[in-house]
Amino acid sequence: MSLAAHLLEKLAPWRAAPAWKVAFSGGLDSTVLLHLLANQSGRDSYPPLSALHVQHGLQAAAEAWPAHCERVCAALGVPLGVMRVDVTPGASLEQAARVARYGAFEAALAPGELLLTAQHRDDQAETLLFRLLRGAGVRGLAAMPTSRPLGRGVLMRPLLDVDRGELERYARAHRLDWVEDPSNQDAQPSRNYLRLQVLPLLQARWPRVSASLARSAAHLREAEALLGELARLDLEAARQPSRWPWLELPSLPLAPLATLTPARQRNALRHWLAAFTPLPDSDHWAGWDDLRDAAADAAPVWRLARGALHRSDGRLWWLAGPWSNDPPAPQAWPGEQARLSLPGNGALSWQGDAPAGPWEVRYRLGGERLDLPGRGRRDLKRLLNEAGLPAFVRGRLPLLYRDGRLLAVANLPGLDRVPGEAARLRWTPPRGDEV
């Protein structure tokens, strides 16, 4: 099968996409991909084709690349968009540049559009080897998927099972012109070291090493898919609503997870937490063991990159965003306002006819007491214990005061009314994804 036929076979499921956009660096791989697609687009009905070039400005040689890309695209009759990005230096300049590049691509995709990148089999082998040496798990060793969501569109890698040698032969046969990135010859970065020093040695002994490593990555992707199916089954068995429907936070009951083997617990949690935070490495999973095994009356917390997992009321709760901050300061609530916004803590309102104010909204400091009809003056801490309210909520729960006296506690039946009034005090807590 020719390279063009192979490419079109891979792209057949995406013929109905609104547009195909090629990530065009001007290098060999993306030049071949763009040339293949440009030659085919005039022969059949394909989605509109265009190219996107991201300019990092990290080296002097790169300043000439946009002009080169413009010449190539003009000769092929393909529209080109050039996007300049600022790279924020971090522990890895290469990773920071990658984040900036894909951020630009994501912003450029409209709903359903396809971004085509030119990674090939040798790149896949390099990725697997690099991650293996970093101690990655099954998910990481599955290497690069053929496709994945990217913003409102989809990222597609149609050349992952084509080796670089075939791309080179195509480029020379068609007398294509491309740029060479001088930084690719610097063996100091780890990935470059693997590409320049390690893989050539392996290929000298095992000529098909790239194909073998890519095949292993495919097996690991299949294993990761099976682990995903198992995680979804385990999570579905654990999806029980909490006693606090007004707490719109991601949560799971602990008991169903605790019956699983430790490996299945970690697998289920990896898949659940992946939507919220980068996952911890193996050494940091001891935090899960500590949280799971803490005493029944404890309120353990496992802190992760973008939030924290709390255990309370027999459940696991994912807290992030405003929940990571301290409660706001006390504030006045004028009587004419039916709803009060609480900075970083949601909002307060009345269910029913609002009683006349003014009020003051405070938060727990300790030692608060509340008068209850027929029950006398009761300690608030004891009342919250009786209600079983999760520990992480208690410091953020709005308390309604007038003239220095605690009159009502939001959302808790029996405590949420001002004496002599029918309206209930309702708190809409912040969601974990709010800023």
Image (cartoon, grey):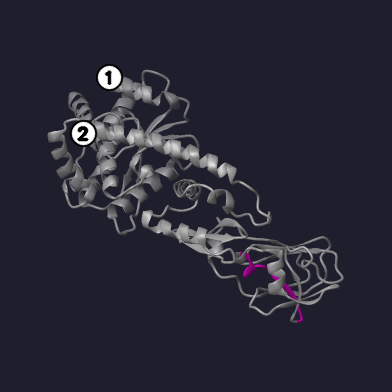
Location of the C terminus by quadrant is bottom right
> Magenta stretch?
393-403
Count how many numbered circles sit on residues in the image: 2
**Residue 360 placement (x, y as % from top left):** 72, 75
Q: Residue at x 30, y 59 (%)?
A: 91
Q: Nearer the viewer, residue 370 or 179?
A: 370
Res. 299 mark: none
Q: The residue under label 2 is which amino acid type?
A: Val
Nearest to N terminus: mark 2 or mark 1: 1
Residue at numbered disc 1: 2
Circle 2 residues within 10 Å: few <14, some 14–19, many ≥20: some
145 vs 296, left or right, is left
Asked if residue 395 is among those painted magenta in the image, a careful observer would answer yes
Residue at numbered disc 2: 209
Say what secondary structure mark 2 lies in: helix
Decide if residue 265 is in sight here: yes
